[in-house]
Image (cartoon, rainbow, N blue to C red):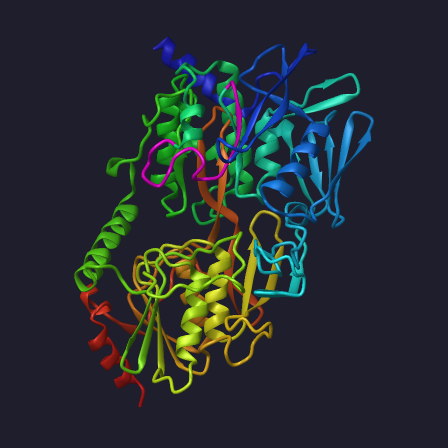
Amino acid sequence: MLKKFLSFLMCAILLCGLLPAFAEETLTEKTFPLYLDDIEHVDEIHLVFPDGNEEIPYVSADEMCRLLNYICHDLCMDEGYQLTLHQQGVNALLIRENGADTLIDFENSVISFNQYDAFVSRSNAVNPLDMLVLGKHASGNEDPDVFLINHENTFSCNGNYTAFDLKEYGIPTPVSGEKGYLPLQTFSDIFFTGTGTALCWNGQIAVLASSAALIDSMQMQTPLGELYYSVPVRERSEALIEFNLNELCLALDFHYGLKEEHNIENFRDYFTRSGLVLDLTNPDAQVSNSALSRLCMQHFSDGHSSLVAASPYAEYGSAAVNLDGMSVGLITKLMAILEYNAARTTAYPEGTPAYEEVGNTAYVTFDIFTLDAFKDYYTAEIPENMLAETADTLDLLIYAAGQINRENSPVENVVIDLSNNGGGALDAAVCVCAWALGTHTLYIEDTATGGQSSTLYTFDANLNHVFNDSGDSVRTKNLFCLISPNSFSCGNLVPAVFRASGKVTLLGKASTGGACVVQVLSTADGSLFAVSGRRRINTCNNGVLYSVDAGVEPHYYLPKSAMFYNRQKLTDYINSLMW
């Protein structure tokens, strides 16, 4: 009984952030390898350890500035990014080339931003919430006058002044001499949110990891993952348990975009109310990882949130998700995926053509929105006979535009099939909208800062360097979109845009939401996970932004999955609607 009481008391102390910060400590400085998303791309990172505790590394402001410049230039291909450091005593002022800045007050453990969204945005962003990674120019083409995707700011409102009071989370920022130091995990959670990566530490190496860096699509360790998990399995110390929980609360309080929908005021309170705190503070990382997985798959259950890679403190794979760890809603989604995949495989056992004409109707099928960030689409050969399962979205759009708009084309109806589309690259999804409608306005808000923006996109589908001409879109055709419960994330965004436009008829069954952009995060004990982030995609009506997280209803309901893929009958049905 006493043991249980002491355990409960420790959990309460951790949740309240009452354990003392570092006293006057001895700082040990060391240099370690830093792997940038794969085992081939390696740099170094200079870390500091108070009192020699190598479980919780810290970084100086000058090292933070160096790393951000290097990573944004080399890994994120943002040549215009420039961050400069101005020391103000032991405190540090970091200023972006776009004027956004942050003050790191090490003495008072406060990090403040004048415009957080602008600080973490790309240098070529047309507004602080512009999400287009490729920017204005066709990636891979060095000619500054050659454009593939054009985007223009139509409205933006900066977010509120943003400050992180680390004292509220029991996160120390030790000072020694004329330098202050920030925990590596805090650096990752606050400063890397625009890169699609997170910093992970296993005690021997640091890794800047995207969601696929450590574990591949087949749930196998990558070569970098094998190195990352080569350290001994061990228990977590009390200091690491405390810091891991505090930092997790900080990261989720700021980044999780669906707190209001889940009635979460803050995660300290939520972890107590849900009972997760006991497992999250267990010395065994296997137990803690399982709790993190349950948080994502049962409590959040939003389709975006998941444990991506387990902590190196635990046996690899020990927290692997199974059906027992999934909510009923996620199991229902999984069953829908299997149902519609089976129906389509029956209709197309050799694979689904990405472009197919049936009578006067063209079917353009996207299973995933994807593009090649290193490819020059103006000079590359556009493949024929693409399959929906593997097609590059921009290749498919360029090819389909040429076929549909060719001379003497029989195509009167265009069906954009998203019935097996679970999302993908937002850049590619935006291009699909612009290709169908001629132009597309993307509305985004930041649920944490309050920032809002709208951005107008056009796509040069006929590769003639002129935007929004007749060959760039299929807007003059009768437009349809096929959706199902598999249409999620960007596969839900596109039909939401189509329905809001009033120019596209939706067929099938309701899509299943996923309005928030995925945010990759890590934990202080080295786990990698993903959540529905603070940047939310919306539609707009009467100047008011509305989330598309609830999904989109079709105009015409198709009750059976087999109906989606009998394209001759579907074509006849579509033609019967065109009176």
Quadrant occupied by the C terminus: bottom left
| Left or right: 63 in relation to 494 | right
Q: Residue at x 65, y 61 (%)?
A: 143
- The x and y percentages for residue 544 are 56, 66
| Rendered residue at 44%/24% (across/down) | 227
Q: Position of residue 565 (x, y in %)?
A: 23, 67
Indicate the quadrant where residue 7 lies. top left
- Which residue: 53% across, 17% down? 55
Image: 165 above or below 393: above
Coordinates of residue 198 in the picture (x, y in percent): 53, 35
Examine the rendering and report whether any part of residue 272 can be seen: yes
Left or right: where 121 falls relative to 272: right
Quarter occupied by the N terminus: top left
- Of residue 565 and residue 94, the one placed in the foreground of this image is 565
- Residue in the picture at 29% in, 48% down: 329
Tell me if residue 217 is in the magenta stretch. yes
The stretch of residues the image draws in magenta is 203-221
Residue most extreme to the right: 89
Furthest toward the left, the residue is 346
Q: Main secondary structure of the magenta part?
A: loop
